[in-house]
Image: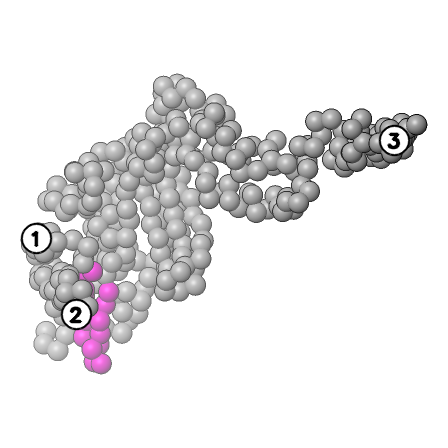
């Protein structure tokens, strides 16, 4: 006499495999237990008892983890399209990156470097003068990652100075700058950032600006490479103008990121060029840390603004007084 299990084994009732492949399987296995999947299909798209597959969430996570191409080009690896499908997670994507650390066609560094150097545009001396000027201000220079063979320039500005950053990118277009807008977690709602491409000629600039490879170190060699327009770029980056109620000007150059000795060197350099400057300092009561900056008096400020106004752009005219500066009381 057949048992209940035997009857189930002999049952010819069929159901579709739950993995979604449309294959029909017997409802009961040879052991009498209810079946849900064809053999080996229980791992194929099986999300039973798990969180639903969320491709958007996986892609957001992958975007934050994207590694740089190992060839040193400064670009990040792509998220493989064939892994952007149901059943594939972040572990599969990371495994792909580990096994293939280069972007397509980027594996042979020597050939890529030859081609890159052959096609690289020469940075003209006047452009280098601008670069050395803005590096004294808001610009930074560094290697984007440990694989990079050449450094790049970077800026971050507030929304108010977006036009100024776009202008700098336009003037340095041979360095292939890329602008992007991001949320600002500090002052203001957005930040505008710009990164240039990595360039072999910037390696010499880095060695002058960061001789120790760590942080900027002001030297006379660096300062003497700044052109008059580069001086204006530095002022529009890091300078500010104070006006008295009568319109008497006073320039401050916010060099708080440099040491007292470096500030003194900059002040002496400016004075030698005809812009009498003095170093000032203040101490934050909370931290007790002292910060140094540079200041110019009214007569020097008038000369400074008159000399550099020709290099301004409309969105930065506020740093030149917007025609509100009074004439000197005594001629």
Secondary structure beneath dot 3 equals loop
- Dominant SS of magenta comes to strand
| Residue farthest along the right direction in this orientation | 1
Rounded to the nearest angstrom, the CA distance separating label 3 from label 1 is: 96 Å
Q: Position of residue 126 (x, y in %)?
A: 25, 42
Can the viewer see residue 2 in this picture? Answer: yes
Q: Callout 2 environment at 10 Å: few (<14), some (14 to 19), or many (20+)?
A: few
Q: Nearer the viewer, residue 283 or 93?
A: 93
- Residue placed at 33% from the left, 50% from the top? 155
Rounded to the nearest angstrom, the CA distance separating label 2 from label 3 is: 88 Å
Q: Which mark is residue 285?
A: 2
Question: Pointer 3: what residue?
Answer: 3
Q: Are marks 2 and 3 in contact (CB under 8 Å)?
A: no
Q: Which mark is residue 34?
A: none
| Residue farthest along the front direction in this orientation | 1
The numbered mark, 2 or 1, whose residue comes first in the sequence reads 1
Q: Position of residue 4 (x, y in %)?
A: 87, 34
Q: Are marks 3 and 1 in contact (CB under 8 Å)?
A: no
Instruction: Indicate yes or no whether the magenta region holds residue 250.
Output: yes
- Residue placed at 40% from the left, 39% from the top? 176
**Left or right of residue 79, residue 19 in this image:** right
Q: Position of residue 55 (x, y in %)?
A: 61, 43
């Amino acid at each position: 006499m057949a048992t209940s299990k035997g009857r189930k084994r002999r049952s010819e009732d069929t159901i579709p495999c739950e993995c979604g492949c449309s294959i029909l399987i017997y409802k009961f296995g040879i052991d009498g237990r209810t079946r849900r999947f064809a053999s080996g299909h229980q791992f194929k798209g099986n999300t039973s008892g798990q969180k639903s597959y969320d491709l958007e969430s996986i892609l957001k996570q992958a975007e934050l983890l994207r590694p740089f191409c190992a060839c040193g080009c400064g670009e990040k690896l792509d998220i493989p399209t064939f892994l952007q499908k149901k059943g594939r997670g972040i572990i599969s994507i990371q495994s792909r990156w580990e096994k293939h650390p280069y972007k397509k066609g980027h594996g042979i560094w020597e050939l890529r470097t030859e081609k890159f150097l052959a096609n690289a545009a020469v940075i003209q001396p006047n452009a280098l003068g601008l670069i050395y000027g803005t590096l004294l201000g808001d610009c930074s220079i560094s290697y984007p990652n440990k694989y990079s063979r050449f450094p790049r320039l970077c800026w971050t500005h507030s929304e108010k100075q977006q036009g100024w950053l776009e202008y700098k990118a336009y003037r340095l277009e041979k360095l292939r700058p890329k602008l992007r807008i991001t949320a600002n977690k500090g002052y203001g709602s957005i930040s505008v950032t710009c990164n240039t491409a990595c360039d072999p000629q910037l390696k010499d600039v880095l060695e002058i600006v960061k001789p120790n490879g760590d942080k900027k170190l002001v030297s006379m060699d660096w300062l003497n490479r700044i052109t008059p327009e580069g001086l204006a770029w530095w002022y529009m980056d890091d300078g500010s103008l104070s006006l008295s109620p009568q319109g008497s000007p006073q320039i401050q150059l916010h060099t708080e990121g440099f040491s007292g000795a470096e500030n003194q060197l900059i002040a002496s350099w400016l004075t030698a060029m005809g812009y009498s400057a003095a170093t000032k300092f203040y101490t934050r009561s909370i931290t007790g840390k002292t910060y140094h900056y540079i200041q110019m008096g009214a007569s020097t400020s008038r000369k400074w603004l008159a000399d550099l106004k020709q290099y301004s752009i409309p969105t930065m005219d506020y740093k030149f007084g917007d025609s509100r500066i009074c004439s000197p009381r005594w001629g």
